[in-house]
Amino acid sequence: MDTFQPAFSSWLNAPAHQQWLAAEGLRLLAFAKAAKLPEGFGNLDEKGRLPANARAETMNTARMTHSFAMAHIQGLPGFAELVDHGVKALGGPLRDAGHGGWFATAHHRDGDTGKAAYLHAFVALAASSAVVAQRPGALALLDDAIHIIDTYFWSEEEGAMRESFNRDWHVEEAYRGANSNMHATEAFLALADVTRDNRWLVRAQRIVERVIHTHAAANDFLVVEHFDRDWQPLLEYNHDHPADGFRPYGTTPGHGFEWARLLLHLEAARVRAGMPAPGWLATDAQKLFDNNCRDGWNVDGAPGIVYTLDWDNRAVVRHRLHWTHCEASAAASALLKRTGDERYEHWYRLFWEFCDSHFIDRRDGSWYHELDPQNRPSADIWAGKPDLYHAWQAVLIPRLPLAPSMATALGQLSQSAPV
């Protein structure tokens, strides 16, 4: 597999653009530090403050730990303690000491004692990044996360992740989700690098074959999100709750972009490992990107990518979410590196111009997480500014190779820097 140097002038090769990305990353990190709670990390409001009722959540703690680990790996002071705090929280109040696995909130204070694949994928990702950062307790956390995934979530028969269980693992949800399997794919790429075990790349490809090369390909490369236990599409799932933050009705263009990027990372990882990489990984990535641009961008007469579409490609939830645009720009950069095609330069610049003018909040910090259909700041789906992970990765991915995974790539760059 080759990567290409574009014949035209690309922002990816422009030192000033690289410096801009790095500076924006530092701004995002400085804002996110305030999320620290005694039992992990919580959700910041729009001003960067922890609300009085803030509680530690596994999702945000794992994402913050992963993000702060990548900051520490780069040699940015002030993040080692935050990584250690996240590792301790994931090994303590967020973990189920009786049955194993992780609750959604510390000591399941939200009343939810279930175990979700989505959250466990992020725990594995956080642990792998903390191992690369060489932080205490990280390897034990990684071993624990791998054990839980192997024991409960990974289905060898299906070649995918089971969705969720009750607390003691005896009752399984009769549902399969593309979203949890997408983040499992992301985590598996990192696990392959940290453990040097290629079974994670085998598993990642099996997930991609099912979710993208089978189901999305049959739906014009718009991702089918919801399935029953036998992987039959549930096209009307959450029709009455279309703006759900994790399981919205219809198809989600942001996930199409995210999958496109992951397919290219998987292709590069398999080549790097000396494994066969089917040609459809790159072609499917291009189709995912192109078709989600076609159907997601400017579909209601205003710039930006809508949150969801129905099965006739009509906008359902017209809000613009920041993570969608982060993933779109990251996918454009990945495709630009992979193909050298100038159309991806066009989209890459367009997405960053939109983010700069609409999402980046230079008054109160970080990014607005959501815009309404008129591109005004909104909080209908996501309140506040809890998410560092998406924007931080969006400013890192254009500066890194397609493989290895981000934390490992940053570690190698640090090792190869001249002294």
Image (cartoon, grey):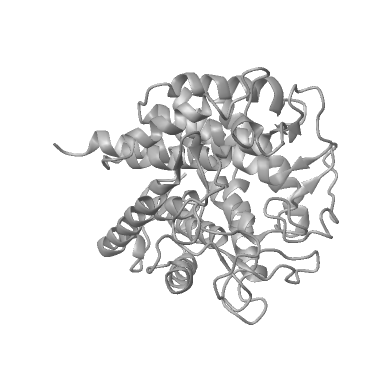
Left or right for 125, reference 413: right
The single residue placed furthest to the left in the displayed view is: 419
Rendered residue at 41%/50% (across/down): 32
As displayed, is residue 320 above or below residue 323?
below
In front: 185, or 84?
A: 84
Q: Quadrant of residue 171?
A: top right
Rendered residue at 30%/58% (across/down): 23
Rendered residue at 71%/45% (across/down): 178
In front: 324, or 263?
A: 324
Query: In the rendering, at what x and y percent does residue 307 appear?
Result: 66, 64
Q: Does residue 84 appear in this view?
A: yes
As displayed, is residue 314 above or below residue 66?
below
The single residue placed furthest to the front in the displayed view is: 52
Q: How many marks?
A: 0
Q: Does residue 277 appear in this view?
A: no
Query: In the rendering, at what x and y percent does residue 214 appear?
Result: 75, 46
Rendered residue at 51%/24% (across/down): 91
As displayed, is residue 147 above or below residue 363?
above
In what quadrant of the picture does the C terminus appear?
A: top left
Left or right for 23, reference 351: left
Q: Quadrant of residue 188?
A: top right
In front: 9, or 238?
A: 238
Query: In the rendering, at what x and y percent does residue 119 appear?
Result: 62, 37
Query: In the rendering, at what x and y percent does residue 29 appear?
Result: 37, 50
As displayed, is residue 361 above or below residue 51?
below
Left or right for 247, reference 268: right
